[in-house]
Image: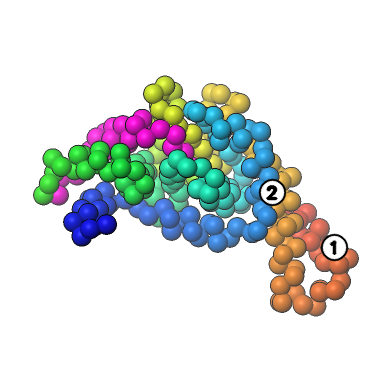
């Protein structure tokens, strides 16, 4: 990239003032254990979602069952196996910048700016009328630009994690419904949340996190940990390792 392009990119990103969801993503993905979460790749509902032209899944489960780590695993999987842009947002109780609908939209725009020439052109146009940077575009204007990008880009995938940690749950749901119902958008949406905020009419698009598979993930993680040096006293004692693993998995019960 030439210097002028880099300066323009820096200016646009600064004006978008988007929170950085890659921080949450990297933190969650660091907790991912090899071989865990792979059950989802073969789930019929997830396969339909991934391969359909316009699809939605709401993945829900209790607190502590690993939904955020699973979100990061899904994002990594999509980035590796699909050519179309993947954008994501992690709502976060611990960061007030990551609790609003507006900042979700800002984050999506910033991510798409780096991924898509279509997005760069439309976002530059959005800010062109505010060349001095003294006035921010409205939420409605940013949302309209986002819709235009998603329409023109086609085939994007959107992952929204921990909706229950948002201050604007109903607003986000309304946006998801609008996007899902817009026939001109070829979009795949995936939300994760705790059970109590699930609000979606099509029950076929709602998917509980299967605790049996979560327990299997816990078992894989525990088995790997028991082979670490700090559990040297258990090495060479497979029966004792199995007993410890079974006890920990039973105690965890999907958590």
Residue farthest toward the right in the current orientation of the protein: 239
Residue 53 seen in the current view: yes
Q: Mark 1 = which residue? A: 243
Q: Mark 1–mark 2 contact, CB under 8 Å?
A: no
Question: Image point 25% across, 38% down: which residue?
Answer: 122
Q: CA distance from mark 1 to mark 2?
A: 19 Å
Q: Residues within 10 Å of mark 2 (few under 14, many from 20)?
A: many
The numbered mark at residue 17 is none
Question: Image point 70% across, 53% down: which residue?
Answer: 217
**Percent x, y for residue 214?**
69, 48
Image quadrant in which the N terminus is located: bottom left
Q: Is residue 149 magenta?
A: yes
Range of residues picked out in magenta: 133-160
The numbered mark at residue 214 is 2
Q: Is residue 23 magenta?
A: no
**Percent x, y for residue 183?**
42, 21
In this rendering, position of residue 151 left or right of residue 255: left
Q: Is residue 53 above or below residue 194?
A: above
Instruction: Describe the element under mark 2 as helix, strand or loop.
Output: helix
In this rendering, position of residue 200 left or right of residue 100: right
Question: Image point 34% across, 43% down: which residue?
Answer: 116
Q: Is residue 38 above or below residue 170?
A: below
Residue 170 seen in the current view: no
**Percent x, y for residue 59?**
58, 38
| Quarter assignment of residue 247 | bottom right
């Amino acid at each position: 990239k030439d210097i002028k392009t880099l300066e323009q990119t820096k200016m646009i990103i600064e004006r978008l003032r988007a929170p950085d969801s890659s921080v949450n993503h990297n933190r969650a993905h660091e907790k991912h254990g090899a071989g865990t979460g792979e059950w989802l790749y073969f789930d019929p509902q997830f396969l339909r979602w991934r391969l359909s032209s316009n699809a939605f899944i709401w993945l829900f489960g209790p607190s502590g069952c690993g939904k955020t780590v699973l979100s990061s695993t899904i994002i990594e999987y999509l980035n590796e196996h699909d050519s179309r842009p993947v954008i994501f947002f992690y709502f976060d109780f611990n960061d007030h910048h990551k609790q609003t609908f507006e900042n979700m939209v800002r984050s999506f725009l910033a991510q798409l700016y780096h991924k898509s020439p279509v997005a760069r052109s439309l976002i530059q146009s959005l800010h062109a009328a505010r060349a001095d940077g003294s006035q921010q575009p409205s939420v409605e204007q940013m949302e309209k630009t986002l819709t235009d990008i998603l329409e023109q880009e086609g085939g994007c995938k959107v992952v929204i994690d921990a909706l229950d940690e948002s201050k604007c749950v109903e607003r986000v749901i309304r946006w998801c419904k609008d996007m899902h119902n817009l026939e001109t958008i070829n979009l795949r949406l995936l939300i994760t949340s705790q059970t109590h905020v699930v609000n979606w009419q099509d029950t076929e698009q709602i998917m509980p996190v299967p605790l049996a598979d979560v327990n299997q993930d816990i078992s894989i993680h525990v088995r790997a940990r028991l082979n670490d040096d700090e559990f040297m006293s258990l090495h060479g004692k497979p029966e004792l390792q199995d007993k410890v693993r079974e006890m920990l998995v039973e105690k965890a019960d999907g958590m």
